[in-house]
């Protein structure tokens, strides 16, 4: 993407320098090993900084081409693939998932003698909005039942998933869940292509996201940042987040959490959304679809139960409805999402502004780095 001086895009370089100073401070304090961050506006990059190290042992520096496990930032990419097929008329949002994945015809709510059929079928829209009744991959229930394994294929994953009870009736509650990995399997059914191949040929390739994929090849492994957690007595220690590491090709092409990416790659994806589903003459989504999926899609009762201030869009993004309920500076209509290993993005449609911050940290937000970085970006924006 083209670069421009911050002032030309209405951004204060002094405040952006303060954002960099914050990142350097957290590296010096050994709260993080390193980070890559970017701010872009109106399709041009005003700020792209890499600080610290990818790996403390090898002393490899962070660079704009450093690869990060983006975990749940995979979800918006999967949702775009789904909505591309919706634009092509392959399915309706209100259709039962069981129409395409018959295994879902036997799901039950609750366990034991009290188990019962759901009040209504799970729909495709439920999967996108996380109102399906499914649970999260880290839940005790799914762990006990062995639902999620990166050694399983997508069909095997679905078979295991439907054996677990639903947590509640579809459409009654927002519950962040494994629904997006189910959507990856649906993409295979609708398109007739393996999910990873569909993403590569229809989304990532056209957007020129050359470094975004489900695993890191040997040739690229030197660019993969190490995940760090606090060490006993201070400092950082490396941790492995998966039994099948991201340097090996997994059997499970996981639409919820499976991708690795770079900050420049995700800038391109973010700008496609901000630009109404099109980037550099390549259109992925109809303009009306792109606008719809980044607005709140939760029904009033479900939204109220979630607190009412943060909605959820079909693009698998948080949507700011009331900035007073957000613990960082934000505007109505701003949307984005994060990843459990320390990545996050924010899109501000009103100002055509993209902010991305990537680290590899467990926990994901040491010392409130996300909120503090976002505060500096906000102070830089005119």
Image: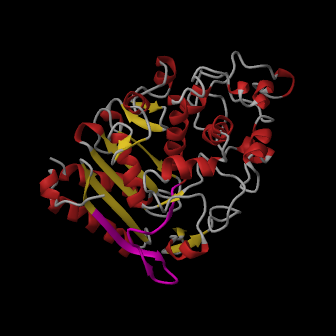
Picture residue at 59% right of the left edge, 28% below the top = 90
In the rendered view, tell whether residue 367 sits above or below residue 331.
below
Residue furthest out toward the right: 113
Q: Quadrant of residue 47?
A: bottom left
Residue 232 % position (x, y) = 56, 73
Q: Is residue 61 magenta?
A: yes
Picture residue at 70% right of the left edge, 63% below the top = 244
In the rendered view, tell whether residue 253 sits above or below residue 232.
above
Residue 140 % position (x, y) = 72, 44
Residue furthest out toward the left: 7
Q: Nearer the viewer, residue 164 or 188?
A: 188
Residue furthest out toward the front: 281
Picture residue at 59% right of the left edge, 47% below the top = 198
In the rendered view, tell whether residue 54 sits above or below residue 71.
below
Residue 77 % position (x, y) = 50, 45
Give the magenta range: 48-70
Q: Is residue 29 visible?
A: no
| In the image: residue 172, left or right of residue 300 | right
Q: Is residue 20 magenta?
A: no
Q: Quadrant of residue 16?
A: bottom left
Picture residue at 60% right of the left edge, 46% below the top = 255
Residue 9 % position (x, y) = 16, 52
Q: Nearer the viewer, residue 361 or 163?
A: 163
């Amino acid at each position: 993407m083209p670069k421009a001086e911050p002032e030309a895009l209405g951004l204060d370089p002094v405040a952006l320098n303060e954002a960099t100073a914050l990142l350097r401070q957290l590296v010096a304090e050994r709260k993080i090993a390193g980070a890559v961050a970017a701010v872009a506006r109106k399709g041009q990059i005003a700020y792209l900084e890499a600080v610290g190290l990818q790996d403390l042992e090898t002393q490899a520096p962070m660079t704009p081409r450093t690869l990060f496990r983006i975990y749940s930032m995979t979800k918006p990419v999967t949702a775009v693939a789904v909505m591309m097929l919706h634009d092509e008329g392959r399915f309706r949002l209100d259709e039962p998932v069981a129409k395409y994945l018959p295994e879902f015809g036997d799901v039950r709510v609750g366990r034991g003698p009290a188990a019962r059929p759901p009040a209504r079928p799970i729909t495709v829209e439920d999967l996108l909005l996380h109102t399906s009744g499914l649970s999260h991959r880290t839940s005790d229930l799914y762990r006990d039942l062995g639902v999620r394994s990166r050694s399983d294929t997508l069909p095997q994953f679905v078979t295991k998933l439907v054996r677990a009870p639903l947590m509640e009736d579809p459409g009654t509650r927002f519950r962040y869940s494994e629904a997006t990995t189910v959507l990856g399997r649906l993409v295979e059914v609708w398109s007739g292509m393996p999910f990873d191949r569909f993403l590569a040929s229809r989304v990532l390739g056209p957007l020129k996201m050359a470094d975004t994929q489900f695993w890191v090849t040997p040739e690229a492994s030197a660019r993969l940042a190490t995940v760090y957690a606090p060490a006993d007595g201070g400092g950082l220690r490396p941790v492995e987040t998966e039994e099948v590491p991201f340097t090996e090709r997994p059997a499970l092409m996981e639409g919820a959490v499976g991708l690795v990416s770079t900050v420049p790659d995700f800038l391109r994806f973010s700008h496609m959304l901000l630009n109404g589903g099109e980037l550099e003459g390549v259109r992925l989504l109809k303009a009306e679809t792109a606008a719809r999926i980044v607005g709140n899609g939760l029904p009033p009762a479900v939204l109220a139960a979630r607190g009412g201030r943060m909605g959820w869009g079909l693009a698998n993004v948080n949507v700011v409805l009331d900035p007073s309920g957000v613990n960082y500076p934000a505007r109505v209509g701003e949307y984005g999402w994060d990843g459990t290993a320390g990545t996050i993005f924010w899109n501000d449609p009103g100002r055509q502004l993209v902010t991305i911050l990537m680290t590899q940290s467990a926990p994901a937000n040491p010392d409130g780095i996300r909120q503090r970085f976002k505060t500096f970006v906000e102070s830089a924006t005119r």
